[in-house]
Image (cartoon, helix red, strand yellow):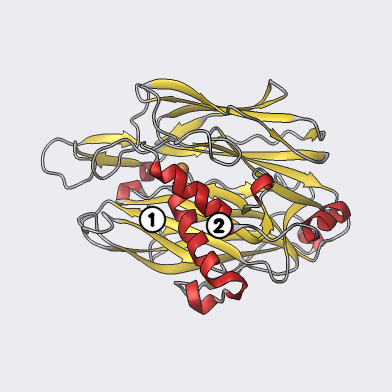
Amino acid sequence: MMKLEAILAVLCTIGAGLGAAVTPQQATNSIPKVEILEAKNFRDLGAKRARITYGPYVVPGSEDATTHGMKTFQELPALMPCRECLITSYAPDLVFADGKPANANREMWLHHIGLSNMNRTDTACASRNWPERISVNGNERSSFDMTVKGTQKAGYYVRKNDTIFLATDAMNIDEKPQTVYLAIDYEYIEGTPDGFDIVFPVWLDFKGNCLNESTGAWQGEAFEAKSKTSFTAPWSANLILMVPHTHDGNTKQEVFLNGTSICQNVPGYGETAEFVSHVNEHGHDHDHGSSEHVLHVSSISQCSDVIKTNPRDRFTISSTYSMKEHPAMKDHDGSLEPIMGIEFLHFARPRDEAIKDILAMPEPNLQSFLDQVAENNAKPH
Ligand SMILES: [Cu+2]
């Protein structure tokens, strides 16, 4: 099964090969469809909302010898709803052609979606100048609302020439190929309006800031995975939103500021029928023999209390897993899928100093990222 790092490695291979000359024709799979919706927040300030549907993505069947039903679809650059604007929220869904959810009960998983900005450097791994990892999402399909339901004036700044990379990792459990689409509802405001802060996304991970401390292998039946090092932001900010990503088996995730817990995320399992699958002992669903209901992560709580942070503040993370409480995800061959414990910290910073810093960022170093990915992949899981 393809790991997130492998997806990002694909991105880096493409990026490294093409340098700055990436064009949509070279890497985009789809002709996205754009629908205009009504904004939920800040309509009075001109906010807009659009659903962009990327695809069609044809996912091979689970019996396909090469992919085992797992395929990554790339949008590079991904069509954005706006340029020179603030994205204030985004929320993904994997759907079929009829718009209905493509989920575990219909043998289809949104295994991962990764968003990166190829024109900014990553805050968590700044020492190596990685391209900026904006977020990763899984089948839980979390929404990232940087306005926190209209209570915060903040958004992610997309510049005119930013290349945003979107990788969708779809997993088909059915023996037959299935066609799916990735729909993302974006809310946005043109320009960088007065009074709006600019969000710096930070990838906090028990694997370490540069993913170099752990492979994510299960450490027994029940355990707490912790980051060995910490993340320290170079600036003051308002930490306005924390969005987690974990895998099946997770029972709790926690973020610490200078050793004190500031956020606890709790996953929900099988809260609606879409997130319940019937899996036999082989881990895929041709129903020859006994099958059981398996409840998968269907949501995970976020934290949105505003916390003022200072340049010397240290952030760490722990993620608790127990396969006694919830079955672990398995690869096609029955081996355990590596776990993840990531928290996307959204730091809101005053517009003018934020833009100054963004303009001063060095060119991201794709090779540095690629080297770490290769090193991780070479380690046994
Ligand atoms: Cu994951």
In this view of the protein, can residue 324 be seen by the observer?
yes
Neighbours of disc 1 within 10 Å: few (<14), some (14-19), many (20+): many
Quadrant in the rendering for residue 35: bottom right
Q: Earlier in the sequence, mark 2 or mark 1?
A: 1
Residue under numbered circle 1: 170
Instruction: Tell me residue 273's x, y (percent).
Output: 36, 42
Pick the front one: 30 or 105: 30
Residue type for callout 1:
Ala
Quadrant in the rendering for residue 287: top left
Residue 25, compared with residue 131, is above or below; it is below
Per the model, the C-alpha gap separating discs 2 and 1 is 26 Å
Instruction: Tell me residue 120's x, y (percent).
Output: 69, 58
Residue 27, label in figure:
none
Query: Secondary structure beneath disc 1?
Result: strand
At 49% from the left edge and 72% from the top edge, which residue is drawn? Answer: 28
Residue 367, label in figure:
2
At 33% from the left edge and 48% from the top edge, which residue is drawn? Answer: 1
At 21% from the left edge and 46% from the top edge, which residue is drawn? Answer: 285
Instruction: Count the labels in the image.
Output: 2
Pick the front one: 279 or 18: 18
Query: Secondary structure beneath disc 2?
Result: helix
**Residue 59 left/right relative to 374:** left
Question: Quadrant where the C terminus lies?
Answer: top left
Residue type for callout 2:
Gln
At 45% from the left edge and 49% from the top edge, which residue is drawn? Answer: 374
Instruction: Tell me residue 169's x, y (percent).
Output: 42, 55
**Residue 309 left/right relative to 67:** right
Instruction: Tell me residue 108's x, y (percent).
Output: 34, 52
